[in-house]
Every structure is written in structure tokens, then in C-alpha cells.
Amino acid sequence: MKHQAAPFVAGMLQRRSVLRLGLGTAALLLSGCNPNKLTFSSVDVTGAEYGKGFELSDHNGQVRHLTDFAGKVVVMFFGYTQCPDVCPATMIELAQVKKLLGADGERLQALFVTLDPERDTPELLQAYMVNFDPMFLALRPTLEQLPVLAKEFKIYYKKVPGKSAESYTMDHSAGSYIFDTQGHLRLFTRYGSGAPVLAADIAQLLK
């Protein structure tokens, strides 16, 4: 019986080897068609049908478009200069991210988009940016552009009345959008993610 079973077992082993070889080849071919996907800590929104671009004046009065920053990773945050906590904390974090990136930090462009163009004059926005990094830019939509821009980027904002007409505050979304070096929206990062985590995500997009 042993001698009769031996050819059968040998045949089975040979067929299994061929099967494993075939599966291995198929896996290799599939891996070639599907290169390793980048893994981010931020929310991956690659392929989103919103946040396609903008046409806004910066704090220097120059009209800016997303295409102006080709070759850089762009981080876009919506806030206002009189924001007491979230806005300055986010901008400080982005300044830290730039330092953590080392030489690649020059390829990071932070954009602060004001949701309060009534009070945030170009002069005030310029002074505000200097507090964080002189290369960071503030963008100032008109009152007519603001709701259209908010809809395009799915941003929430609402004026909250204060004790006087000038003392109002703004409720608003607290996250940031991140565009790759080709100008494609790739990531949404939540407030308070931390500079090291954000720097790691941006470093991948810069490669």
C-alpha cells in the first residue's frame, strides 16, 4: 500500500506546488497593478468632488489661485483673527510642522482664510500672519464670495452676536484641508491632531 500511495501523494504535492506557484504569480501581478497605498493619520479624502480651487485676494492684495502653489503641499484653514483659541493654536501647530519638516518645510504653504472679512482687513491679516510665519498667507474673500466658498469647501460658519455690533464672535469648522503638490485635495485633518502626526502625513505627500 505504501508503494501504491507514494505516486498519488507525490502527484498531490506536485499539484499543490503548481497551485502555490500560480497563486504566487497572480498575487505578484495584482500587486503590480495596485501599488502600495499611502497610509495617513488624517482623514483621506482623495477623489473628493469638492474643494477644487479658489480665486481670492491675499493680505498683500494679490489675487491667488490654488495653482499658484504647484509643487507645494497646501494646508488651508478657515478662521478669523479675533478667534481666542482654535485659530491661533492651529497656526502655531502649522509653524511647528514646518520646522519638523526641516528643509522640506519650504515646500509647505499654509493658507489662513478669514471668515470675518468685515473686521479682518488686509493690514490686520498681514500683522496676524507675521505672528506665526512670514511665508504664511491669509486670504480674504468678499462678503459675496464667502458663502460660495464655504459651500465649495463644506465649511460651517455662523456669526454669534455679542454685547455690541462689533463684539460678535464666529462659530466655525475647526479642521484643515491638505492639498498635494499637484493641487489635489487629499486630506482633512481635525483640530488638535498634533504637529508630529501632521508633519508625518505631509512628509508622505512631499515624497
Image: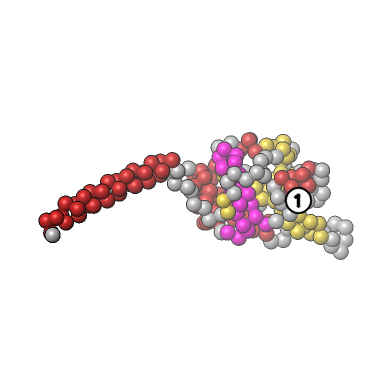
Which residue occupies the extreme bottom position in the image? 163
Label 1 residue SS: loop
Which residue occupies 23% across, 52% down? Answer: 12
Which residue occupies the extreme left position in the image? 3
190 lies above or below 101: below
Circle 1 residue: 115
66 lies above or below 160: above
The answer to whether any part of residue 184 appears in the image is yes
Measuring from the top left, give residue 166's x and y in whole percent.
Answer: 85, 57
Magenta stretch containing residue 159, yes or no?
no
143 lies above or below 166: above
**178 relative to 21 in the view: left or right:** right
| Range of magenta residues | 174-193
Measuring from the top left, give residue 71's x and y in whole percent.
Answer: 55, 37
Measuring from the top left, give residue 80's x and y in whole percent.
Answer: 74, 53
Name the quadrant containing residue 55: top right
The residue type indicated by label 1 comes to Leu
Which residue occupies 78% across, 51% down? Answer: 116
Magenta stretch containing residue 186, yes or no?
yes
**73 relative to 120 in the view: left or right:** left
